[in-house]
Image (cartoon, helix red, strand yellow):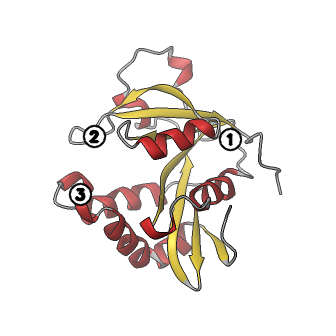
């Protein structure tokens, strides 16, 4: 059950970049125990955010309670010649990874502060971000050791596509996909 008072706000690239200090501060809070690993540093996250938010079709949905940012989800369509699938560990037919900017939405990040987890907020952010997307499918990467997140995604209809290491210093993630529109979300 999503708590009363959750205020959702959608942002495009310019809007998200205008609040990026808040986004980075929340990231640092959530990943506090991992910030000493260069891959998880705020600086590396800021680099990834700059790349993600620069894509055409980028969108971010932020959740606030009493004005305080407690979580957000963001992503954008995979462009032609994307590097997204380059770290895929399994061989798949080329047509499954060929992108045209309209086929696949990449959900790059979804995070909620510890105090607000297990209250339906991540699902609400997820659904709000994906509800009206025109793409045919969505993809995301999840750490296979993050059992709560992985279990949630699978229960929301996501399916394992393969295993992917997006950068040489990154972990190997489970790459998940889901068909759009989401079957449980009515388009608005």
SS of the residue under disc 1: loop
Residue 169 vertical position relative to residue 130 in the rendered view, above or below: above
Which residue occupies 71% across, 39% down? 180
Residue 59 in view of the camera: no
- Which image quadrant is residue 123 in? bottom right
Q: For residue 23, say whether it is visible.
A: yes
Mark 3, Cα crowd under 10 Å, few <14 / some 14-19 / many 20+, is few
Residue marked by disc 3: 34
Residue sitting nearer the eye, 176 or 3: 3
Report the Cα–Cα distance between label 2 and label 3. Answer: 17 Å
Residue 32 versus residue 85: which sits nearer the camera? 32
Question: Which residue appears at 73% of the width and 45% of the height?
Answer: 134
Please name whichever residue, 136 or 187, is drawn nearer the observer in this view of the structure: 187
Total numbered circles? 3
Q: Is residue 13 above or below residue 94?
A: below
Q: State the residue position of label 1.
A: 135
Report the side of 156 relative to 163 (left or right): right
Q: Position of residue 155 (x, y in %)?
A: 61, 38
Q: Where is mark 2, residue-wise? A: 167
For marks 3 and 1, give the CA distance: 33 Å
**Quadrant (top left/top right/bottom left/bottom right) for the N terminus:** bottom right
* SS label for mark 2: loop
Q: In this picture, is 146 found above or below 177? A: below
Quadrant showing the C terminus? bottom right
Q: Earlier in the sequence, mark 2 or mark 1?
A: 1
């Amino acid at each position: 059950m999503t708590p009363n008072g959750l205020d959702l706000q959608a942002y495009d690239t310019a809007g998200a970049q205008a609040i990026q200090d808040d986004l980075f501060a929340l990231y640092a809070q959530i990943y506090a125990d991992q910030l000493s690993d260069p891959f998880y540093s705020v600086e590396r996250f800021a680099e990834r955010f700059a790349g993600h938010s620069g894509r055409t079709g980028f969108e971010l949905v932020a959740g606030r309670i009493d004005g305080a940012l407690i979580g957000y989800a963001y992503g954008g369509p995979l462009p032609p010649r994307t590097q997204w699938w380059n770290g895929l560990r399994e061989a798949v037919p080329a047509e499954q990874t060929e992108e045209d900017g309209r086929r696949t939405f990449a959900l790059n990040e979804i995070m909620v502060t510890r105090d607000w987890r297990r209250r339906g907020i991540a699902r609400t952010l997820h659904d709000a971000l994906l509800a009206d997307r025109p793409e045919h499918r969505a993809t995301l990467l999840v750490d296979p050791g993050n059992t709560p997140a992985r279990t949630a995604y699978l229960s929301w209809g996501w399916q394992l596509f393969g295993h992917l290491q997006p950068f040489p210093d990154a972990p190997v993630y489970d790459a998940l996909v889901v068909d759009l529109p989401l079957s449980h979300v009515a388009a608005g």
